[in-house]
């Protein structure tokens, strides 16, 4: 078992993001003597962490002799050759961007190697884990060329995988350096297989999960239907499309949205044009615990997620865990979660009228909430899924 776990993050334990990592940590943080978080963004006050946790702030401004610039260029060329070799498709990313990202990653690698030497940690006593298949995986890919690392694992979600959403610079280099890539859906796993020359044993699908609820969401006894959504307010989340759907449903509905984002003012303006039968409440940013308390105590007829870009949303898992039926779009990993048992799945090209009609039929049908919750317990249980992931982290195989 590794005594030290290094976790690379975007910002955790700073800021409000990566709440699902916070939930995951509950299941294995006590299995390590020491946990070190290395975030990219370090802003504001850190969240409360376990006693065995600390933060390492990595700097990119490192002094080195001028000849090192030639060394970096040579290493870049070798890495770029490997990148082309492992990718099955043609590289479309700009080579200048490739170099800039490599240079930045190389600076971070120098700092981390220096820290590893100062700490005198034995390779078998440390596990490296990146929550995202982003920058830190590139950094560790560079480190592995010069420093012995016993185990390096990364999760892979959505924007950190699919080139047509956000070109995955250094995807080949990262794939070629990983001991284990953990995808959150079979769709993501198949994307790696289709686009990279990758060994089967490197890839595994291990689903995220949520805590199973003891209580089911209470049944709505009122005439007015309650619809809920939970996401950031950005273009790809398509809250404007939810507004269009509500505009088509000639029923009394209250729509409650949890989440904040740059398009809030625009969506609130759209909402003013809805007919009087639709009531809307924007809750803004709410911590995860309070959202779950809301699901437990307040009747919800339907949970909406009409996003065009979703890996496999934890927000849907949470709603399902309370037996709340869900509506989602057939993109990426969503079909692995949303089915005839759990709710309604629509095509991306389906219009608001089509969706509204099917929602009305669904609302009037017999919905087995216990069956919905049992689906989550079987496939998306945090207790089961994170216990399985824990075994990957703690055993050096």
Image: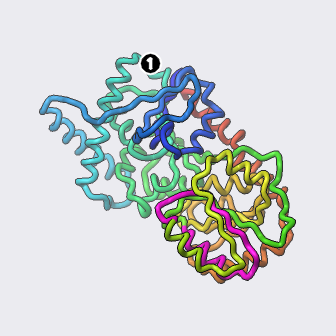
**According to the image, label 1 marks what residue?**
122
Q: Is residue 247 magenta?
A: yes
Res 255 quadrant in image: bottom right
Res 332 quadrant in image: bottom right
Percent x, y for residue 269? 53, 73
Whether residue 350 is visible here, answered yes or no, is no
Residue at 75 percent across and 63 percent down: it is: 325
Whether residue 266 is visible here, answered yes or no, is yes
Which quarter of the rendered picture does the C terminus lie within?
top right
Q: Is residue 193 magenta?
A: no
Q: Is residue 14 above or below residue 207?
A: above
Residue at 58 percent across and 50 percent down: it is: 184
Q: Is residue 126 above or below residue 271?
A: above
- Viewed as shown, does residue 38 lie left or right of 23? left
Res 274 quadrant in image: bottom right
Residue at 29 percent across and 36 percent down: it is: 60
Percent x, y for residue 101? 30, 47
Residue at 47 percent across and 36 percent down: it is: 45
Which quarter of the rendered picture does the N terminus lie within?
top right
Percent x, y for residue 306? 60, 68
The residue lying toward the viewer, choosing from 65 and 364, is 364
The residue lying toward the viewer, choosing from 127 and 190, is 127
Magenta region: which residues?
238-264
The residue lying toward the viewer, choosing from 96 and 36, is 36
> Which element type, helix, strand or loop, lies under badge 1?
loop
Q: Residue furthest left?
A: 66
Which colour style is shown? rainbow
Percent x, y for residue 338? 69, 62
Q: Is residue 355 above or below residue 213?
A: below
């Amino acid at each position: 078992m590794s005594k030290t776990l290094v976790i690379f993050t975007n910002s955790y334990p700073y800021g409000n993001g990566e709440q699902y990592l916070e939930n995951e940590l509950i299941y294995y943080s006590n299995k390590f003597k020491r946990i070190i978080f290395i975030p990219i963004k370090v802003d504001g006050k850190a969240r409360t962490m376990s006693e065995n946790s600390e933060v390492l702030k990595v700097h990119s401004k490192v002094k080195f002799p001028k000849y090192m610039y030639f060394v970096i260029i040579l290493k870049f060329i070798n890495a770029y050759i490997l990148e082309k070799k492992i990718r099955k498709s043609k590289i479309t990313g700009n080579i200048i961007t490739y170099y800039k990202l490599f240079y930045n990653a190389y600076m971070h690698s120098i700092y981390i190697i220096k820290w590893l030497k100062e700490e005198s940690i034995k390779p078998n006593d440390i596990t490296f884990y990146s929550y995202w298949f982003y920058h830190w995986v590139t950094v560790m890919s560079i480190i592995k060329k010069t420093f012995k690392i016993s185990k390096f694992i990364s999760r892979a979600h959505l924007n950190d995988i699919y080139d047509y959403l956000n070109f995955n610079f250094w995807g080949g280099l990262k794939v070629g350096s990983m001991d284990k890539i953990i995808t959150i859906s079979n769709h993501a796993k198949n994307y790696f297989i289709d686009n990279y020359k990758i060994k089967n044993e490197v890839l595994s699908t291990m689903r995220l999960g949520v805590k199973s609820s003891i209580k089911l969401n209470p049944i709505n006894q009122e005439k007015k239907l309650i619809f809920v959504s939970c996401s950031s307010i950005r273009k790809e989340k398509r809250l404007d499309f939810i507004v269009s759907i509500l505009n088509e449903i000639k029923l009394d509905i209250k729509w409650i949205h949890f989440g904040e984002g740059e398009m809030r003012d625009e969506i609130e303006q759209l909402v003013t044009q809805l007919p009087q039968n639709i009531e809307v409440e924007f809750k803004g940013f709410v911590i995860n615990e309070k959202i779950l308390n809301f699901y437990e105590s307040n009747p919800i007829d339907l949970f909406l997620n009409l996003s065009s870009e979703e890996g496999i949303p934890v927000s849907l898992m949470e709603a399902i865990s309370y037996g709340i039926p869900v509506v989602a779009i057939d993109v990426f990993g969503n079909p692995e979660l949303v089915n005839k048992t759990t709710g309604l799945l629509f095509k991306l090209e389906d219009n608001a009228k089509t969706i509204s009609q099917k929602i009305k039929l669904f609302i009037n049908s017999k919905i087995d909430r216990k069956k919905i919750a049992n689906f989550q317990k079987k496939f998306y249980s945090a207790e089961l899924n994170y216990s399985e992931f824990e075994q990957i982290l703690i055993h050096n195989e």
